[in-house]
Amino acid sequence: MSAALAEYFDKVISTDIFAHGFGSVADFLNSTYEADSFDWVITNPPFNLAQQFIIRSLKIARRGVAMLTRTVFIESVGRYEHLFKDNRPSRVAQFVERVPMVEGRLDRAAATATAYAWLIWEKGRLGSCELVWIPPCRKKLERDKDYDLPPIM
């Protein structure tokens, strides 16, 4: 994800709790970041820690937060009470095709039965949550070089 973002943005800071061959190794939840220290926080957090990642990211992002989560993440009385009730995302962008994910790498042959969506909070955009669909695009957007080893960031 960081390599793709670096194609569009001048500066991308990439960290992970494990060394995957790019970015630096850091524990996002236990690292020190000042409030408003990044324009955006964009990540696919460990799904069991997604709520904590979102709450932390909302404090350190100036402009917005985008979290890639399983679609079922939006279900849960607990998450509604502790996160969504007072921090609705401005958009939920639902993938209409299944996006296979393999930890730390891409796999051309991977498949999945799991649905994913981007949950996006835009600072200053309060109110209702917009549901949008991400149309089928995997085959159109994938490139052979995407399957090369990621660059060290």
Image: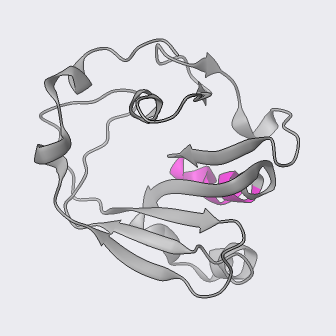
Closer to the camera, 82 or 40? 40
Q: Is residue 31 located in the magenta-colored stretch of the structure?
A: no
Magenta span covers which residues? 46-55
Residue 45: x %, y % from top left: 55, 46
- Scheme by which the image is coloured: one colour
Closer to the camera, 112 or 11? 11
Residue that appears at 68% across and 80% down: 126
Work out whether residue 34 can be spotted.
yes
Residue 117 vs residue 36: left or right? left
Residue that appears at 36% across and 75% down: 132
Residue 25 falls in which quadrant of the image? top right
Residue 62: x %, y % from top left: 75, 53
Closer to the camera, 99 or 81? 99
Residue 52: x %, y % from top left: 71, 55
Residue 100 vs residue 94: left or right? left
Residue 53 vs residue 16: left or right? right
Residue 133 falls in which quadrant of the image? bottom left
Q: Is residue 54 located in the magenta-colored stretch of the structure?
A: yes
Residue that appears at 34% across and 27% down: 105
Closer to the camera, 143 or 81? 143
Residue 116 falls in which quadrant of the image? bottom left
